[in-house]
Amino acid sequence: MIFIVYHLPHCNLYYGWYPKKILSGSIVYSLVVILWMKTSRIETLVDGIFAISMTLLVLTLDVPKVSNFLTEAAFQQQLGVLWPQFFCYFLSFWILGGLWRVNHQHFNFIKHTDHTLVTINIFSLIFIAMIPFSTEMVSEYGASYFTANMIFQVNQLLAGSLYYINWDYSVRKNLLDDVDARTVNFIRANTLVLPLCAILAISLSPFIYAWSNLIFFTIPVFKRLLERKYFTQGDD
């Protein structure tokens, strides 16, 4: 069965003749038109949402309201109370930066798209945009309520899982260009690191509350181990 595809670069339109059925010994062809958006449009939207989300994180930091009659030592003590907010701000900025890198890693090889891939990316951006909200939730209530931590951790789980789905779908639908099997498997494993860390954090949250979020700082360690597994050892 042959499906010949032609490309019109000026409008990113693909069309071809697809053998639909055999009638009286003759093959009847149907004209199939495939309209792919340029991946640059997705990348532009993603960059914008990430930039806004990372900027909004600073709004989760509250300037303390203190009396002008406090001593310098008392004022510094009031600032010290803010450390959970700074911790959550740094952690969320760190995670968003990692997700942004994963997205660009994907689209370094994804050269075509379709409606399903666009939908996957839209859903992933829903949870990217929610990270400032879940960050403020965990910074305010994470020390006292494990539910606040789970809101933050489930947010990371869903965002990371959708990026895994994004890559897996692109591989299955042949939307990639110029990528070998080892790189495909590495990126698939690399994309799974955040969801797996989120699952581990969720399982620890009822016992150690906000401290369970320290698990996310192990992400670079796991990614370095994956690099050694797929590339350093593979080159020996």
Image (tube, rainbow, N blue to C red):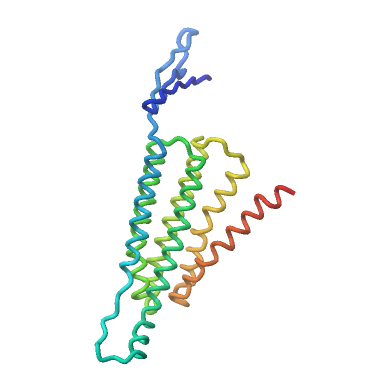
Q: Is residue 221 left or right of residue 152?
A: right
Task: Name the spot of residue 69 as percent of width and height, x first.
Answer: 25, 91
Q: Is residue 19 above or below residue 71?
A: above
Give the camera-side residue of 185 and 110: 110
Q: In the picture, residue 68 is in which quadrant?
A: bottom left
Task: Name the spot of residue 151 as percent of width and height, x first.
Answer: 37, 66
Q: Is residue 150 above or below residue 162?
A: below
Q: Is residue 125 above or below residue 147?
A: above
Give the camera-side residue of 163 and 108: 108
Residue for point 45% across, 61% down: 95
Task: Name the spot of residue 173 as percent of width and height, x first.
Answer: 49, 36
Q: Residue furthest right?
A: 236
Residue for point 36% across, 55% down: 51
Give the camera-side residue of 147 and 235: 235
Residue for point 51% across, 47% down: 105
Task: Name the spot of residue 73 as percent of width and height, x first.
Answer: 36, 90
How many marks do you count on the picture? 0
Residue for point 66% across, 54% down: 229
Give the camera-side residue of 145 and 187: 187
Q: In the picture, residue 75 is in which quadrant?
A: bottom left
